Image: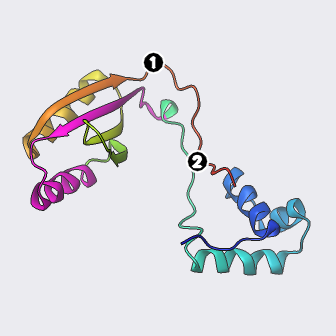
């Protein structure tokens, strides 16, 4: 269920999405309010689950992660136990930044970030040793054209 937000809430969320490390004073100045109302609104949006967490975005390349693969997976097991094993295996792999269950011929798509192709192969070998898969297709991203965490609010 969507939470009701007014214009000031949305302005605060835009500021937080642009730079969550801003001070309350800076956010208040940017949205045309004062510090206390901004703090109260942020607190209420956290309590309502609109704001899940505060984090920092790191530069993968600067940290040596030069390869991004999108991995399309068709699993062999579609029962609840097979899905649970698959999810457990994914959650144990820090290389998996995103995982989505899909409608259609492909069961899952993963976004996997590793240092290089050899590291991807190590990831792949570990994954298929833990879960039964019918088919895996790995697509190497040649260039990131757009990446954002900002929702269009």
Q: Which stretch is magenta?
A: 63-92
| Element under disc 1 | loop
Q: Are marks 1 and 2 in contact (CB under 8 Å)?
A: no
Residue at the image point whose x is 50% and y is 21% from the top: 143
In 3D space, how far apart are the residues under numbered discs 1 and 2 (Cα atoms)? Answer: 20 Å
Reading the image, the residue beneath label 2 is 149
Residue 126: mark: none
Residue at image coords 82%, 68%: 8
Residue displayed at 67% across by 54% down? 17
Is residue 77 located in the magenta-colored stretch of the structure? yes
Q: In the shown orientation, is residue 28 left or right of residue 109?
A: right
The answer to whether residue 94 is left or right of residue 136 is right
Q: Quadrant of residue 107?
A: top left
The residue singled out by tag 1 in the image is 142
Task: Give the x, y percent position of residue 110.
Answer: 33, 40
| Secondary structure of the residue carrying numbered label 2 | loop
24, above or below 103, in the image: below
Say whether residue 113 is left or right of residue 135: right
């Amino acid at each position: 269920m969507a939470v009701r937000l007014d214009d000031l809430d949305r302005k605060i969320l835009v500021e937080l999405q642009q730079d969550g490390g801003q001070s309350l004073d800076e956010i208040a100045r940017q949205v045309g309010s004062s510090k206390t109302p901004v703090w109260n609104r942020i607190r209420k949006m956290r309590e309502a689950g609109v704001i899940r967490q505060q984090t920092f975005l790191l530069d993968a390349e600067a940290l040596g992660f030069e390869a991004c693969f999108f991995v399309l997976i068709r699993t062999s097991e579609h029962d609840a136990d097979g899905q649970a094993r698959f999810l457990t295996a994914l959650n144990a792999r820090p290389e998996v930044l995103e995982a989505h269950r899909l409608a259609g011929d492909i069961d899952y798509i993963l976004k996997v970030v590793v240092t290089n192709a050899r590291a991807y192969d190590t990831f792949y070998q570990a994954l298929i040793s833990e879960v039964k898969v019918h088919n895996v297709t790995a697509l190497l991203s040649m260039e990131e054209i757009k990446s954002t965490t900002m929702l269009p609010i």
